[in-house]
Image (cartoon, rainbow, N blue to C red):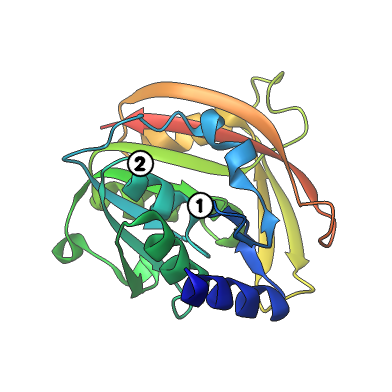
């Protein structure tokens, strides 16, 4: 426990992480976003025993760890080297996540197929969201759960809007390209060869009070092939 506490302290002294993790026993990894506040919007099955999961754009790994805690065999990918918080959270919860430094657009069917593909808050950062969805489809056996920044009127308009932002981030070398309405996301999933829309939800994603303040409307859609 003391070794774990030391690792958490080191992460926090270095500025914390993208995701906040409450590891129990008064061990908390500071993070920009506390996804425990929003996890129910994703409609992830309570039990994932016997399920293979791919978490694309995992960042510091909250969704990957959450799926592992629900019994899934989890693989997580992102462009960057694995983050210490992912290892610490896995150790604290007694689960494992296989992390690979990969670009979604470099993958093909030889990478394997997964029962559930998760992609949280990544589409806004790619130049072509539809191409990304088609890549995700090639890796998916059954279900996808996809979240992204939405247009302000997403919940009330039937227009398939992809609003171009074109904003370069101030905290790293990446771009925020798109806000996407739920109608557009639904139609892109169908164009990507997902046949059934199962679940939709909207929420407002906000950073934690002690972090740089960002607030963005989000939409989550799950679909099956």
Residue 19: image quadrant is bottom right
The residue at 41%/57% (across/down) is 56
Mark toward the start of the polypeptide (1 vs 2): 1
Residue receiving disc 1: 129
Left or right? Give the position of 69 relative to 84.
left
Q: Is residue 54 visible?
A: yes
Dot 2: what SS? loop
On screen, 224 above or below 123?
above
The residue at 76%/27% (across/down) is 153
- Where is residue 160 shown, x and y percent of the image? 61, 31
Left or right? Give the position of 42 relative to 155.
left
The crowd level at tag 1 (other Cα within 10 Å; few <14, some 14-19, many 20+) is: many
Dot 1: what SS? helix
- Where is residue 151 shown, x and y percent of the image? 72, 37
In space, the residues marked 1 and 2 are separated at their CA atoms by 10 Å
Q: Which mark is residue 192?
A: 2
Q: Is residue 83 visible?
A: no
The residue at 61%/54% (across/down) is 124
On screen, 155 above or below 144?
above
């Amino acid at each position: 426990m003391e070794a774990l506490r030391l690792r958490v302290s080191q992460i926090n002294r270095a500025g914390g992480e993208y995701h906040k993790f409450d590891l129990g026993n008064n061990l908390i990894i500071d993070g920009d976003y506390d996804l425990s506040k929003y996890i129910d919007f994703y409609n992830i099955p309570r039990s994932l025993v016997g399920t293979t999961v791919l978490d694309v754009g995992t960042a510091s790994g909250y969704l990957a760890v959450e799926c592992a805690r629900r019994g899934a065999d989890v693989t997580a990918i992102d462009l960057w080297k694995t983050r210490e918080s992912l290892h610490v959270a896995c150790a604290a919860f007694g689960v494992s996540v296989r992390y690979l430094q990969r670009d979604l657009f470099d993958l093909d069917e030889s990478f394997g197929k997964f029962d559930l593909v998760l992609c949280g808050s990544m589409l806004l950062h790619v130049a072509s969201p539809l191409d990304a969805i088609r890549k995700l489809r090639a890796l998916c056996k059954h279900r996808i759960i996809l979240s992204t920044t939405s247009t302000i009127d997403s919940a009330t308009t039937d227009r398939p809007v992809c609003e171009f932002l074109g904003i370069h981030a101030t905290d790293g070398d990446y771009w925020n390209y798109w806000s996407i309405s739920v109608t557009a996301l639904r139609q892109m999933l169908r164009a990507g060869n997902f046949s059934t829309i199962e679940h939709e939800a909207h929420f407002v994603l906000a950073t934690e009070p002690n972090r740089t303040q960002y607030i963005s409307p989000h939409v989550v859609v799950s679909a099956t092939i």
